[in-house]
Amino acid sequence: MSDRKSHARGPRCPICNEPTATATRPFCSRRCANIDLGRWFSGVYAIPVVEPSEEDLDALESLAQSGESDGDERD
């Protein structure tokens, strides 16, 4: 039910929860946009990465090599 109420008020700033401004959407102000950007730069936000295993790397390498030997040239 709370989802319907939040959508009824309109979109809110993810930093301070104030209503968003069209010029700085999805934020309410340039200040909140800069706070968010600073969080990305400082590593507070991060996109998780899964490192491929040796088996995965070997499989990709053999696929790449088999594609090269097919004589399929692309421009």
Image (spheres, rainbow, N blue to C red):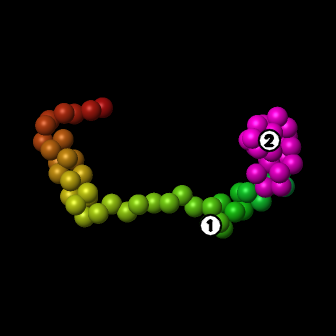
The residue that mark 2 highlights is 6
Residue 63 placement, left or right of 1: left
Question: Residue 75 lies in magenta, yes or no?
Answer: no
On screen, 31 above or below 43? above
Residue 15 placement, left or right of 39: right
One can see residue 25 in this view: no
Q: Nearer the viewer, residue 70 or 5?
A: 5
Residue 1 placement, left or right of 66: right
On screen, 49 above or below 60? below
On screen, 36 above or below 74? below
- Quadrant where the N terminus sits is top right
The residue that mark 1 highlights is 43
Give amino acid for label 2. Answer: Ser
Q: Residues within 10 Å of mark 1 (few under 14, many from 20)?
A: few
The image position of residue 47, as x and y in percent, is 54, 58
Give amino acid for label 1. Answer: Gly
Residue 39 picture quarter: bottom right
One can see residue 46 in this view: yes
Which residue range is magenta in the image?
1-28
The image position of residue 71, as x and y in percent, is 14, 35
- Which mark is nearer the camera, 2 or 1? 2
